[in-house]
Image (cartoon, rainbow, N blue to C red):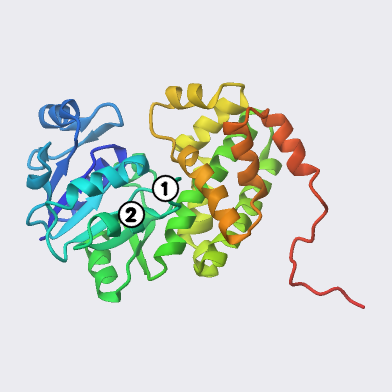
Amino acid sequence: MAKIGVIGAGSWGTALALLLHKNGHEVTVWSILKEEIAMLQEQHEHKDKLPGVKLPEDMFFTTDLKEAAAGKDVLVLAVPSPFTRSTAKLLRDVADEGQVIVNVAKGIEEKTLMTLSEIIEEEVPQAVVTVLSGPSHAEEVGRGIPTTIVVGAKKKETAEYLQNLFMNDAFRVYTSPDILGIELGGSLKNVVALAAGIADGLGYGDNTKAALITRGITEIARLGTAMGAKFETFCGLTGIGDLIVTCASMHSRNRRAGILIGQGKTMEEAMDEVKMVVEGVYSAKAAMGLAAKYHVQLPIIEQVNEVLFAGKSAAEAVKDLMLRDRKLEISAAQWEA
C-alpha cells in the first residue's frame, strides 16, 4: 500500500483518487477551495463535477497542503493547467526530497512556452516529475469503464512503479520515456477539439470531423517531432487516441465549448456555459508561439486562434482552411517518372 496525495479535487483528481483507493492505497485529497472540501467531507461525492460517483468513507479530504503532501510516496497533481505553476510554488515548501509527482493536467504555458512538467521541475526541483495522459474522461474512469492510458517518466523503474500503482482490471497503463511527446499530444489535441466542436456547431458532418482529426494529428506530430518528441508517440494513446476521444465525445469540455462557438457564442460565453476550465483556449496561443519558434505550419490551430482571439467567424475560418494552397498529403512519397 502506498500513501498518495491528490492535489486538486476536480473531476479528474476525484476520479483518480477513487481509482487509487480501490487499488488499496491510502489517499488524501487536497483542494484550495474550502467549500469543495466541505462538500466532499460531508457528502463523499463531488456533486458539481462527478455526480453519482460515491467516494469511500475512509478517504481523507483537506485544505492543508502540508497534510496532503508531506510523507506521501506519490503526489498526483490534478489542478487545471492555468494553476499548475502557482500550485507547484506552494508545493516547493512541502514536497519531500525525491518525492514522485505525477502531473495529470494538459497544457502549455503561454508566456514561457513550457510544458507543465517543465514548470513543475522548475518550481519543485527536489521532486521526480512524471506524467499520466491518454484518452480518459473522468466521468468514465469514475464509473470503472475500461480505460487505457500512458505514464511517462525519465527512468524505467519510476514508470513501472507508477504503472503498478495505477493499473487494475478497468485501467490499463502503458509506460513511455517520451514525456515531451505525451505532453504535446495531450495539450494540442485540446485545440484541435475546439475546431471539431466548432464544426459540429456549424452543422457540419462526419467528413469534416474526420478531416480535422487526421489533419490535426498531422499538425501536432509535425510540431512535436520538430521539438524532439518521438513520431510513434503521436500514433499512440496520448496522440491520436486522446485526439479521437476529445473530438468525438460530449464529455469533452473543449468540444462542448467549440460547439457553442460554432453556434455563434463568444469564447467567454462558451467558457461560462461549460463551467469548467477549457484547456484548449489556454494552449491555443502557446501552440502558435511554438510554431513560430520551430518554424512549423499549423493551419488548423492557426484558424482556431483567429476565431478565439481575432473575432473571425467560424464559417470563414473553415472556408480559408479548405481554400489553402494545394498540397501533397504524403510529402515523402515518390511519383512514377
Q: Is residue 45 left or right of residue 280?
A: left
CA gap, disc 2 and disc 1? 8 Å
Circles 2 and 1, Cβ within 8 Å, touching? The answer is: yes
Where is residue 320 drawn, in percent x and y?
76, 39
Tell me the residue at 64%/34% (across/down).
Answer: 199
Q: Is residue 102 above or below residue 164?
A: above
Q: Residues within 10 Å of mark 2 (few under 14, many from 20)?
A: many
Tell me the residue at 44%/22% (across/down).
Answer: 273
Asked which secondary structure carries label 2, the reply is helix
Where is residue 283 drawn, in percent x and y?
48, 44
Q: Nearer the viewer, residue 176 or 54?
A: 176
Quick one: quadrant of the C terminus?
bottom right
Q: Which residue position is annotated with label 1?
A: 109
Asked which secondary structure carries label 1, the reply is loop
Residue 119's label in the rendered image is: 2
Where is residue 291 drawn, in percent x and y?
59, 54
